[in-house]
Image (tube, rainbow, N blue to C red):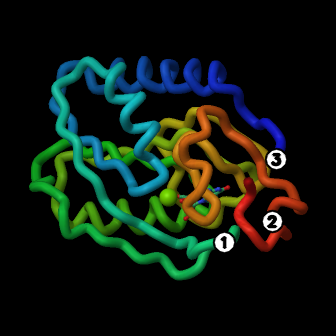
Amino acid sequence: MKLVLTEDEIRAGVARMAGTISGFYGQRHVTIVGVLTGSVILLADLVRQLNMPLRLALVQARSYRGRATRPGPLAIDAEHLPELAGRHVLLLDDIFDTGHTLQELVSQLRRHEPESIRTAVLLRKQGRQQVELEPDWVGFDIPDEFVVGYGLDYDDLYRNLPCLMALEAADLAAGEPLA
Ligand code: 5GP
Ligand code: MG
């Protein structure tokens, strides 16, 4: 694996995003909807730096199965969402790749008739987008590599790494999970 972002760089990026998002919403009430599972670390770090009154919610979206590093069909489970009608919703995900996940989530959440809906991601992969939607806030643009750490997984491992690492061909070829 090779290092893409250090823990310090991520911390600075999250603080930067928090500043911009706080400035944008002011004292408006916001419902932050984190996309499970990859956004949980970001969610926890980000919300503790936001000063507006806010609610937390979670939605599950899954397009990767096991050791896949390219997306399959998208499954969304929005069953546990709270009332979003009339609320300012900020959808938060770990990474914007093709963009299909966020675009589909935005269109599903719109059906709940929120007052507004915006999107923030920690990472955006360069040259991969296939949708019209652009996230409102992006922490970092990164090269087109499969990354893990800070919430992002490979076969559900590595979410706990404090930094961001790119898997290399040898890592992906390995039959067993990396030690
Ligand atoms: P999209 O729908 O934008 O193509 O993909 C977004 C989702 O795919 C993210 O929520 C994330 O779960 C997953 N994903 C995309 N690229 C990567 C990556 O490089 N590493 C990991 N671990 N997940 C990724
Ligand atoms: Mg995800």
* Residue, disc 1: 67
Counting from the top left corner in percent of width and height, residue 148 is at 66, 49
Residue 158 placement, left or right of 102:
right
Q: Amino acid at mark 3?
A: Met
The answer to whether the residues at label 2 and label 1 have Cβ atoms under 8 Å apart is yes
Q: Amino acid at mark 2?
A: Leu
Counting from the top left corner in percent of width and height, residue 80 is at 18, 63
Q: Earlier in the sequence, mark 3 or mark 2?
A: 3
The answer to whether the residues at label 1 and label 3 have Cβ atoms under 8 Å apart is no
Secondary structure, mark 1, is loop
* Residue, disc 2: 172
Secondary structure, mark 3, is loop
Mark 1 burial class by Cα count in 10 Å: few <14, some 14-19, many 20+: some
The residue at the far right in this view is: 170
| Mark pair 3, 2: CA separation | 10 Å
Q: Quadrant of residue 98?
A: bottom right
Mark 2 burial class by Cα count in 10 Å: few <14, some 14-19, many 20+: some
| Mark pair 1, 3: CA separation | 15 Å
Q: Amino acid at mark 1?
A: Arg
User: Which residue does the image show at 57% across and 75% down from the upper left?
Assistant: 65
Front residue of 70/116: it is: 70
* Residue, disc 3: 1
